[in-house]
Image (cartoon, grey):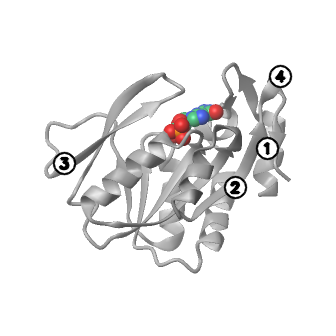
Amino acid sequence: MKALKERILRDGKCFEGGILKVDNFINHQMDPILMKSMAVEFVRRFASTKINKVLTIEASGIAPAIMVGYLLELPVVFAKKKKPSTMENMLTTTVYSFTKDRSYDVCVSSDYLCPGDKVLFIDDFLANGNAAKGIIDLVRKAGAELVGMGFLIEKSFQHGGDYLRQQGVHVESLAIIESLDNCQIKIKE
Ligand code: 5GP
């Protein structure tokens, strides 16, 4: 998606270990106009997919997910990173975070992720695919169906996208970063 690619080149910053910082418009300060355009693009790309629920993980996925849910007029559920003591019918999985170098539990209530749900997962980044694998596990535990995964930014050099596509998942990424070597942002045309 042209507008996102241009914005990444303008405002994105590289960090050691293959991390792209987009705090200026996605992860800290947020640009709602760009966020809306990205959601419109997801709606276009998943137009032929039957969806009844949008799923994401807190915190950075919530903004794009709610925009998509708003446009599709569908409920948006976010998986939580802290187990609330009050959550009923909890489904959990463990996710390894490479940016934080630790594992954490992610949970969602089966009141909101239900058998038969056709789930579109939306997140900010796809890197090694660990968060996505956790989501696949949660959706399976809920007896729901994963119908697609949409990412604002995919870092193809970390191969999570290869894994998901090999598993037959319909993956859509709005910008694909091929390399961050020598702190140079290389985006797929
Ligand atoms: P994965 O589980 O695919 O390895 O990583 C995905 C998660 O890690 C995303 O939800 C995102 O929060 C975080 N992440 C991975 N790579 C980056 C990055 O380069 N920049 C930022 N800001 N977050 C990242």
Q: Determine which of the numbered discs, if any, sits on residue 7 in the image.
A: 1
Helix, strand or loop at label 2? It is strand
Q: Nearer the viewer, mark 3 or mark 1?
A: 3
Q: Determine which of the numbered discs, if any, sits on residue 174 in the image.
A: 2
Label 2 – label 3 distance at C-alpha: 32 Å
Q: Quadrant of the N terminus?
A: bottom right
- Lateral position of residue 166 relative to residue 82, left or right: right
Three-letter residue code for mark 2: Leu
Ligand 1 neighbours mark 2 (CB distance < 8 Å): no
Helix, strand or loop at label 4? It is helix
Residue 178: x percent and y percent? 77, 41
Q: Residues within 10 Å of mark 1 (few under 14, many from 20)?
A: some
Residue hosting label 3: 90
Q: Is residue 56 above or below residue 82?
A: below
Q: Determine which of the numbered discs, if any, sits on residue 182 in the image.
A: 4
Residue 96: x percent and y percent? 43, 32
Residue with the most extreme top position: 16
Tell me whether circle 2 and circle 4 mark residues in contact (CB < 8 Å).
Answer: no
